[in-house]
Image (cartoon, coloured by chain):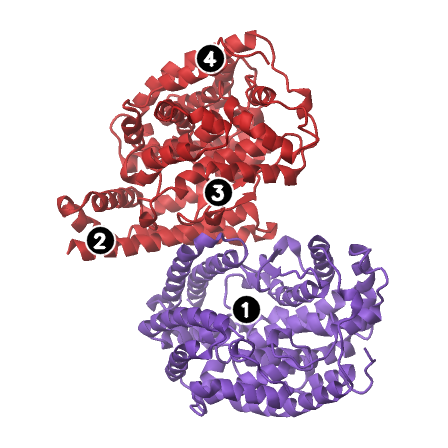
Chain colours: A purple, B red
Amino acid sequence: MPEAKLRDLRARFGEYADVKAAIALLSWDQEVYMPPKGAAARGQQLATLSGLAHRLLTSGEMGALLKDLGEAGDGLGPDDRALVFETLHDYTRATQLPEAFVRRFAEEQSKAYEAWVRARRASDFAMFRPHLETMVDLLRRKADYHGYEQTPYDALLADYERGMTTARLREIFGELAPKQRDLVARIAASGPQREPAWLDQEWPEPAQEALTVDVLRAMGYDFEAGRQDKSAHPFTTNFGIRDVRITTRFNPRDPFSALMGSMHEGGHALYEQGFPPEDERSVLAEAPSLGIHESQSRLWENLIGRSLPFWRWCTPLLQRHFPDQARALNPEAAYRALNRVAPSLIRVEADECTYNLHVILRFEIEVALIEGELAVADLPDVWNGKIKDYLGLDVPDDARGCLQDIHWSHGAMGYFPTYALGNLYAAQLFEEIVEDIPALWTQVEHGDFAPLLAWLREHVHRHGRRKKAVEIVRDATGREPDAQAFLRYLECKFGGNREGS
Amino acid sequence: MPEAKLRDLRARFGEYADVKAAIALLSWDQEVYMPPKGAAARGQQLATLSGLAHRLLTSGEMGALLKDLGEAGDGLGPDDRALVFETLHDYTRATQLPEAFVRRFAEEQSKAYEAWVRARRASDFAMFRPHLETMVDLLRRKADYHGYEQTPYDALLADYERGMTTARLREIFGELAPKQRDLVARIAASGPQREPAWLDQEWPEPAQEALTVDVLRAMGYDFEAGRQDKSAHPFTTNFGIRDVRITTRFNPRDPFSALMGSMHEGGHALYEQGFPPEDERSVLAEAPSLGIHESQSRLWENLIGRSLPFWRWCTPLLQRHFPDQARALNPEAAYRALNRVAPSLIRVEADECTYNLHVILRFEIEVALIEGELAVADLPDVWNGKIKDYLGLDVPDDARGCLQDIHWSHGAMGYFPTYALGNLYAAQLFEEIVEDIPALWTQVEHGDFAPLLAWLREHVHRHGRRKKAVEIVRDATGREPDAQAFLRYLECKFGGNREGS
């Protein structure tokens, strides 16, 4: 009996997964190939398919099946139990929001997004303010619909980082912030780190692209089960485990921008190509949180891609693709160019030492907005004060201040912390990796990433949603996730022993 | 009251159209960019979305709305009446087939397609035979479900060329076949037409692509509302009136292959970009038949693209893109190279004089199969006999004989005739165009295609499904569609006055 119901559940969720895949393709195409006049119709197509997906997930039949299977829980094997439990989780979250609210939220998102685009262009927060007020109001109601124990922000966090709480984030970030701020101040005191002269050349796009492809192949990205295209903002998406695509962008004056982008998205994509094939079309073929997903991209981009051993391997490769531009380059110079530290105003351009500070100030502001401690009207002042406090910089205008990110216009609060958690998870996992694979750095110097990938497959990828992020980190490292490993990594890389630039 | 129901109808059909657009994108991507390992999941996604689309179109609510609106018929304006009538037509056709039959048909299609791929590779009809037998059987049942007056083949034709009958096709083709066969024999008697020596060079793909883009722009194809990509088999698809995409393919030894392919698909695409914007997401934003759709592609490809005035304009353009390869080329030589006539075994490579003969023999075979006059087992013999009769050629193997086309493996019978009808409609419309636009050929010589496009927009494109194909031709030319104009065109171009090659 449970067997027949499980089959039915798989089939129903499979239909939902198929519609989600179509949505993902409509979105991918929109960013990558869609001609400009196709935008209006595409918006409607996305709205229709999102509605259909919602109906499929929240149907009465789905609810009845999940209820029966949930009651049969103990009779199921561990995989089936995980399948039922996780599907029930998504079903429950989706049914907690009334349809009218979901529609209203989507409408306000569109309006807020358009207002944000205009406000950022004009660098005028006042144009965005009423929309953000509405958004904050709707997010509070959303938290109420989902329910929470300590703070409504917990309910929002659950969309992105299940199992993480506001209280725990306060602890972790409370330890991280002063130490990172301190490190940044020490580095700043040692004088400015300038862009090296050799970087200031023309780096043709075709050679940049060929370089990214070589590196992605070496990482283990399967181009038979994915592809790389160009888009304004790099991203990873999938239409199944065997079709995981990434995008990158090229800066003709800087070959590292595309390469680091490709390695970052490649890290995400290796995760999604690493789900067990038998989980295809099921809720299990997903990462349990954005933070753990981000740990994979950051690990490849920063811990590998910005390491000296990597550049011992990659410098000759770069020289093959750019025989003129990179003739005199050595690994140390490439390494230094990629690891300059300087406080800056823009999160997405921040280095490893300052990045989390950008996240932490957003987290503090989001919590204060959702808990009603901060009025939207006061946001720019608070933002600018925190930038001064954490980074020592003056914010010249809203465009380079509180209007720089798209997230709030989409009503995404609780999302930013996952970027910092990705850094922490990555560092904590990586300490374990270096211990488990003593030859790791020698392998990296030879462009052999297979043992590293095998470790990630074993300890992270293959679990899909069978484990929460915190379980993955705990089981792999023997410790709860915390800030220690990341702080050790920063201190080791950027602290006292650091080479001059 | 009808206003509210019309709004409801538009919204419901709009959802259906959105899902169809997603299906079209999944299919486009499959042909153009999908990595190979994505195929299995893509098949499932297409099956799920096709099922959803069917459910949306055939829902009880849709049926009730259409019934009410159909009864209100006379109170509606002409556009609304067309909308209701045409939506009802699609609803009725879709509901005539039981769901179990639709599923069975789709399953047999997959099996037959795979068997056909293997059979063609092995050039062994016996491997395909049982699947084709099943298909013919299912097609007869399909015809029974839809109903027909004279022959079951009429019911199949209705999927592709509504309003056309088997009897009328027999008349038209009966007139066409002997005259075309006669013309081909006369041409063959004047000796073989060889490929000119200057064609046998390397024509680099980037320059070929740039040439196709220049010509498509000149034709009036809007690249802001479409794009051109590469695929194994060129096709046109759309995801709305403002996103109409084409594909082409490049032969490095022949620049005409891609150019004629792009002009052909460009003709299809101009049709779809020419539907009234207010018809978006409605049944009216479609061509009424494949034949009339094909008339647009053939008109641009053959009547324009293979004309001497076109090459007076296009030869310098070709020379700009291929300064070395085309230095000594003149318009007459290009024209002759593009208009060589020679009986051949493969339909898709056939010239204008022989093409319809390939279609007619398929039509005769399909009718005989569906009417039970021909057993599938006898197909190869009959095929080979007809090729000998119509084209004077011996068929060396099944791969170059009755296994060459994909259509029957998809259960598409009644489709082939639309290719020939496209040629006839195009020629008949074109006689009228030349009369209405006396300066047409001078305009073409100057690359000015705007008046031609304006004529097609006015007389063909803007009607969408408001008129049947036969009405479009009749209203534009004052005559029922027939073979006369096409025969006059062939005789004039390839008959006695033809230049030697």
Mark 1 lies on residue: A286
User: SS class of the residue under badge 2?
Assistant: helix
Question: For the residue marked with disc 3, what is the amino acid?
Answer: Ser
Crowdedness of circle 2 by 10 Å Cα count: few (<14), some, many (20+)? some
Q: Looking at the image, which is closer to me, B495 or A263?
A: B495
Where A405 falls versus B112 (above or below)?
below
Q: Residue at x 49, y 52 (%)?
A: A35
Q: Are marks 4 and 1 in contact (CB under 8 Å)?
A: no
Mark 3 lies on residue: B110
Q: Looking at the image, which is closer to me, B245 or A431?
A: B245
Q: Chain of mark 1?
A: A
Q: Which picture quadrant has residue B337?
A: top right
Q: Does residue A71 appear anywhere in the picture?
A: no
Between disc 2 and disc 3, the foreground one is: 2
Q: Are marks 1 and 2 in contact (CB under 8 Å)?
A: no
Q: Looking at the image, which is closer to me, B167 or A108?
A: A108
The numbered disc on residue B181 is 4
List x then y, in percent, for residue B465: 30, 39
Q: CA distance from mark 1 to mark 3?
A: 30 Å
Q: Dividing the image into 4 quarters, which one contains the C terminus of chain B? A: top right
The numbered disc on residue B6 is 2
Between disc 3 and disc 4, the foreground one is: 4
